[in-house]
Image: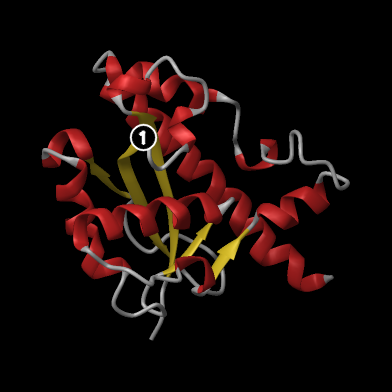
Amino acid sequence: MFCNYYFDIETVPLDQYREEPRAGLDTLKSKIITIQYQPLDTVTGRPHGNLMILKEWELGSERAFIEHFRPMYVPDIWAFVAVGNNLSFECKFMKYKLLEYCNLSNLRLGQRPMIDLKHVLIMKNYGQFKGCTQCIGKRGLAKNISGWYWNGNYDAILDYIQNEARDFIRAYMVMKREIPKI
């Protein structure tokens, strides 16, 4: 039995790299602050349960919530089929953090089953990369996450995550309905 899960993470630069542009995209210079996932119906894409948000600031450390998430994510690749946009980013971070904290090497997370909408969104946008994620609710607000995090504005982060998940799932449900008609 497999289950599709909306899947996303948020990252911020480590303190010593806070002023370095794009440090939040580098596994060596940043940390994961949230992991969010929500079970989705495999046919319609409708949510089957609540959006779960694991928060580094509540579980005490990045290590704690990576270890908490590991049993769900790692053992059976078919039990957690990630659905998202640009999932190579999530796979890269998860692979690095699972090695760092759980000593799991040789993970091939980028080769596990997943549904990545990145390429469909580019095609929908007439082959253009820039702006291709607007239809799934991306409004460029992710650039604020680091500032919100370091200022302790966790509610703003949670609002961002909840809105992004809602918008993504709405668009995904439309795609699940319309793409098979092609």
Outermost bottom residue: 1
* 91 up-or-down from 21: above or below: below
Residue appearing at x 31%, y 41% in the figure: 34
Q: Which residue is drawn at the image coordinates 74% and 63% (left, top)?
A: 178
Rendering quarter of residue 5: bottom left
Q: Quadrant of residue 108?
A: bottom left
Residue 138 position, x and y percent, is 60, 34
Q: Position of residue 9 (x, y in %)?
A: 40, 45
In the foreground, 84 or 65: 65
| 71 relative position to 19: left or right | left
Residue 131's place in the image compared with 151, above or below, is below
Relative depth, front residue between 92 and 117: 92
User: Label 1: how many residues lie within 10 Å, few (<14), some (14-19) or many (20+)?
Assistant: many
| x and y, in percent, of residue 99 in the image | 29, 60
Q: Is residue 15 left or right of residue 123?
A: left
Residue nearer the viewer, 32 or 173: 32
Q: Residue furthest left?
A: 60
Image vertical order of residue 44 relative to residue 61, above or below: below
Q: Amino acid at mark 1?
A: Ser
Against 175, residue 18 (above or below) is above
| Screen quadrant of the N terminus | bottom left
Residue drawn at (48%, 43%), measured in percent from left and top?
Answer: 166
Local secondary structure at mark 1: strand
- Mark 1 sits on what residue? 30
What's the residue at 13%, 42% (across, down)?
59
The colour style of the image is secondary structure
Q: Position of residue 112 (x, y in %)?
A: 49, 74
Q: How many marks?
A: 1
| Left or right placement of residue 122 versus residue 89 in this view | right
Q: Is residue 171 left or right of residue 59?
A: right
The quadrant the C terminus occupies is: bottom right
